[in-house]
Amino acid sequence: AKALAVKMKIEPYRIVREQLSAGGTDLTSIYFRFGGNFYIFSYQKAGVRKHTMIDTGDIRHSNAISSILTESRIDPKAIERIIITHSHPDHYGLAHLLVKGSEAKILVHSNFKNVIEGDRTTFERSWLGLRNPRELRECDVEFLSPKSSKVAIEIDGLKFPRLVEPIQIGDAGKLEILAIPESPETHSKDQIIALYSTRDHYRIKAPVPQGY
C-alpha cells in the first residue's frame, strides 16, 4: 500500500523553464513519464510574444495539453511553427490540435510525407504499433528535403544537411534545422534535429555531396 501511495504521487509531467537571452527569450521543456517530451521557445516578435515548438507530445495527453500550456504561459494562437523531429506518434500526436486557431506551420522532413499518406512498413506497424497521422493532411505542413540543400554543417565528422535557412529566435538566437545523415542506424528515415545557439559556432560548413 505504501509503494502504491508513493507511485501515485509521481506527476505525469514536469515543466522546466530557463531564460536563454537577456532580451526575454525563454525555453520551456515539458517532460512526460510516458510519451515523447517537447520544447517551446518563447520570444518577442513585432511586439508580440511568439512561440516555436519542437515536437508536440503524445495524443494521450490531449486532455492535459490546455493546462500544460496555461501553466507554461503559452498562448496556442501565438505559435508560429511546430518542428516535428520524426514520425513517431509520441512526437507528433498533438500537432493537429495545437495549430487550430493559429497560423502555425508544421515543418517536417520530406520523408514524413510518405507517413501521412499511409506508407508504413510492416515492421513499423507490427512492432511499433504506429498509426498514420492523417489529421496532418488538413494542416499547413512544409516538407523539407535534404536533397535540395546546398549546405551541410559538419559536427564531429558527420555532415548534416541544412534544411532551411537559420530561423531567428528572439533578439539574439537562431535555430538550425538539420537532416540526420542517412544510415541503417537512423532512428527513423524522416528524422531531423534542431540546434539553438546565440552564436554561429558551427564553423565547418561544406557543400552537400552530390547524389545525397
Image: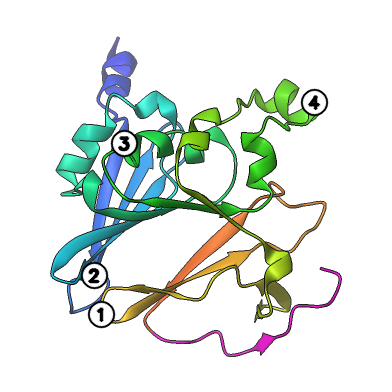
Magenta span of residues? 199-212
Measured in 3D between alpha carbons, the distance from the residue under mark 4 to the one under mark 3, in whole angstroms, is 32 Å
Q: Position of residue 144 (x, y in %)?
A: 60, 59
Which is nearer the N-term, disc 4 or disc 2? Answer: 2
Residue 182 is drawn in which quadrant? bottom right
Residue denoted by label 1: 171
The numbered dot on residue 179 is: none
Measured in 3D between alpha carbons, the distance from the residue under mark 4 to the one under mark 2, in whole angstroms, is 43 Å
Which is nearer the N-term, disc 4 or disc 3? Answer: 3
Which is nearer the N-term, disc 1 or disc 4? Answer: 4
* Type of amino acid at the residue the image marks with label 3: Tyr
Name the dominant secondary structure of the magenta segment.
loop
Q: Is 193 located above or below residue 34 in the figure?
A: below
Which residue is found at the position 28% from the left and 58% from the top? 51
The numbered dot on residue 122 is: 4
Check the image and tell me how it is coloured.
rainbow
Callout 4–callout 3 Cβ contact below 8 Å: no
Residue denoted by label 2: 25
Q: Badge 3: few (under 14), some or many (20 or more) residues near its Cα, within 10 Å?
A: some
